[in-house]
Image (cartoon, rainbow, N blue to C red):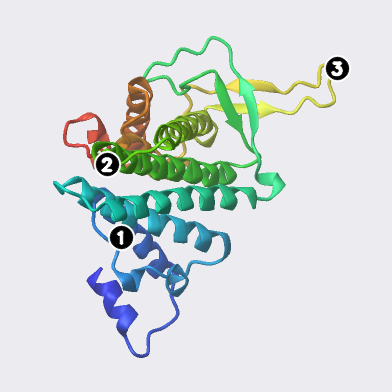
Amino acid sequence: MAILRFWYYHVNRTPATTLIRDTRRGLIRSSLLRNIKIPDWMLDGFIFGERHREEDYDRIFVRTVNLQYASASLQHKDYPDITEIERLSNEAGELDKALKSWVTKFPDKWSYQRHILKGCDPQPNNPFYSPVVYSYSSPGYAAVWNQSFALGMLINRIHLKILGLIRLQQMGDSTFEPQRETCAKRLRTMADSLASSLPFCLEKFRVVDNSNSPSREPSITFRPDGEIKPYLAVLAVWPLSVASIIDGIDFQQQQWFKSQLAGIGKITGEGVLESVKTDKWVIL
């Protein structure tokens, strides 16, 4: 961060390179895991090389990380300010709306198809968490959707914690419970969607187009024990990291996310990811 700050404040700084952009991305993710506020000079992604659709996502993500920091700070106060709690709740709602809007702008070719598998047992080491899986025309498109699912989980988990403060302060009105139920449902939906999307991203199955056959139904070829390519594993690291630190989802599902992340850690050589099942792993 010190080096990046030096570059930012340099009078004759050069245009942001890919290294500059990726370094900032890593720092922002680290800020979330360490519960650190992102400094003002790092907020504008455009300066650091974010462009177009990625810049829009970055804007939502940065605000979410700082929302998590602000929310955690309020959790440690004996008498949190009521006005601040309401402001953070509104911020969380706006972020979720912004994420939904971002997803609606995806090109049609990025869309996914929903399939139902037979005989799927949701065990931690099973590459398929549920019988429902999503397929895409490219693993890259799956990776983008996985980013959105993970961010949706994060935003709504933070919002639930903020709404919990409202309840503790006994300032909830008739809209409190519907809000809480909406956030909880959205969190579950995003978690289920991520679990359904990851098997394709990791090439655990393939879909064969049978549009010319009499049934016209696509056929699915399973690869549950197939070797995961390292570059595909890398695409799954961050969504799985987010999913594994979020409380408030089904326990069995969280264990599945952690198991998948530990397996990815072995493939990518990131030993810290293999510690996901220990008590030292952070939970938001």
Q: Quadrant of the C terminus?
A: top left
Q: Is residue 49 above or below residue 273?
A: below
- Residue 62 lies in quadrant: bottom left
Question: Sequence order check: which comes first, mark 2 or mark 3?
Answer: 2
Disc 2 or disc 1, which is closer to the eye?
A: 2
- Tag 3: Cα neighbours inside 10 Å, few (<14), some, or many (≥20)? few
Q: Secondary structure at mark 2?
A: helix
Pinpoint residue 273: horizontal percent, then vertical percent: 28, 39
Q: Which residue is mark 3?
A: 214
Label 3 sits on what residue type?
A: Pro
In this view, the mark in front (3 or 1)? 1
Q: Secondary structure at mark 3?
A: loop
Q: Is residue 240 above or below residue 219?
A: below
Residue shown at 64% from the left, 52% from the top? 105
Tell me the kind of residue under disc 2.
Leu
Q: Residue at x 45, y 80 (%)?
A: 15
**Which mark is in front, 2 or 3?**
2
Residue wearing tag 2: 165
Query: Outermost residue, top direction?
Result: 119
- For the point 38% across and 38% down, the residue is 173
